[in-house]
Amino acid sequence: MDKKTQHQEKSIKQGKKDEKLPENSKAELDKKLDEGVEESFPASDPVSVKITK
């Protein structure tokens, strides 16, 4: 297995762990997105949501 494949597998495993964190639940991400939309209205800039790991 080459280094690129090993790195990809490690990233996938980390991603699955991140999905299980409470702060990355769908409800929590939706809440953060809603807050971002409210704070940026009526600006034309796109909303930025920061996901922690």
Image (cartoon, grey):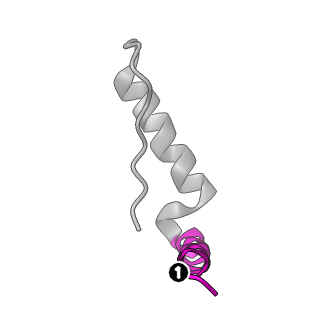
Query: Quick check: is 36 in the magenta stretch?
Result: no
Percent position (x, y) of residue 6?
57, 82
Of the pair 42 and 11, the residue shown nearer to us: 11
Q: For the image shown, how many numbered marks are present on the structure?
A: 1
- Residue pictured at 53% horizontal, 51% vertical: 29
Amino acid type of the residue tagged 1 in the rendering? Lys
Of the pair 8 and 1, the residue shown nearer to us: 1
Extreme bottom residue here?
Answer: 1
Percent position (x, y) of residue 8?
59, 73
Secondary element under disc 1, as helix, strand or loop, is helix
- Residue pictured at 53% horizontal, 77% vertical: 7
In which quadrant will I find the C terminus? bottom left
- Residue pictured at 39% horizontal, 62% vertical: 52
The main secondary structure of the magenta stretch is: helix
Percent position (x, y) of residue 23?
47, 64
Q: Is residue 36 above or below residue 9?
A: above
Left or right: 18 in relation to 26: left
Percent position (x, y) of residue 37?
45, 28
Which quadrant of the figure has residue 15?
bottom right
Q: Is residue 50 above or below residue 52?
A: above
Report which residue position mark 1 lands on.
Answer: 3
Of the pair 8 and 47, the residue shown nearer to us: 8
Pointer 1 local density, CA inside 10 Å: few below 14, some 14–19, many at least 20: few
- Residue pictured at 42% horizontal, 26% vertical: 38
Which quadrant of the figure has residue 1?
bottom right
Query: Quick check: is 6 in the magenta stretch?
Result: yes
Q: Is residue 27 above or below residue 6?
A: above
Left or right: 20 in relation to 42: right
Task: Please provide the residue range marked out in magenta.
Answer: 1-21
